Image (cartoon, rainbow, N blue to C red):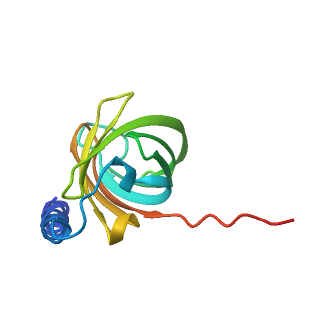
Amino acid sequence: MHTFNFTKILYSSALLLLIGSAANAAPCTNASLNGAYGFQDLGRHTEGTAFAEFRSIGVMTFDGRGNATRLETLWFSDLSINPVPAYQVTYTVQPDCTVSFVYVGDGDTFTGVIVESGLKLLYLETSGDPVRNGQAERMKIIQNTY
C-alpha cells in the first residue's frame, strides 16, 4: 500500500511541475487536443473486487471541440483481459494547458496537462473507482497512397 501511495505522490508532483512549465507556453484551447492519442494507464481498484491492480492500453480520439471517444483493453492482476467497448468522454482545456475530462457513462473525472505542444497528455483520476494515472501520445497516422 505504501508503494502505491508513494507512486501517486510522485506522479502528482511531476504533474504539478509540468503544469508550471506549461504556463510559459502558448495558450491552449480544446483544439490543442485533436486526433488520435495512444494511451496507457495503470491503477488500483479501491472497492472490494477479485483483482486489485490493472493496466490498460488503447486509443482516445479527440475532436478538438470538447468531445472524445475512448477504446481500450484492460489487463487485471487476476490475469484476465477485458476489451472494453468505445465510450464517450467530454473534456475542457484551459489556457495554461491543464485539461479536465469526464467519462460520460460513469462520471469518473480526470485532471491532466498537455505537454510538448499537444503531442502528449499526462493525467490522474480525481474521482471514481478505480484510482488511475496515465499518459497519452499523439499518433502519427500514415495514409497509404495506392
x%, y% of residue 130? 29, 43
Q: Position of residue 109 (x, y in %)?
A: 26, 39
Which residue lies at the image location 16% right of the left edge and 70% below the top edge?
A: 24
- Is 76 placed left or right of 14 in the picture? right
Look at the picture and state if 63 lies above or below 10: above
Horizontal side of 82 relative to 11 (left or right) equals: right
Residue 54 image position (x, y, % from top left) = 39, 53
- Compared with residue 104, is residue 138 higher up or lower down, i.e. above or below? below
Residue 72 as seen in the image, left or right of residue 77: right
Residue located 37% across and 46% down the image: 51
Near-viewer residue (92 or 18): 92
Front position in the image: 40 or 7: 40
Total count of labels:
0
Q: Residue furthest front?
A: 26
Q: Nearer the viewer, residue 47 or 129?
A: 129
User: For the point 33% across and 41% down, which residue is it?
Assistant: 91
Q: Quadrant of residue 26?
A: bottom left
Quadrant of the image occupied by residue 88? top left
Relative to 107, does residue 32 appear above or below in the rendering?
below
**Which quadrant would the N terminus be assigned to in this image?**
bottom left
* Residue that protrudes farthest toward the top in the picture: 105
- Taking the spot 34% from the left edge, 72% from the top edge, the residue there is 116
- In the depicted structure, whether residue 46 falls above or below residue 39: above
| Rendered location of residue 5, percent (x, y) | 14, 60
The C terminus lies in which quarter of the figure?
bottom right
Judge from the rendering whether residue 142 lies leftward or rightward of residue 40; answer left or right: right
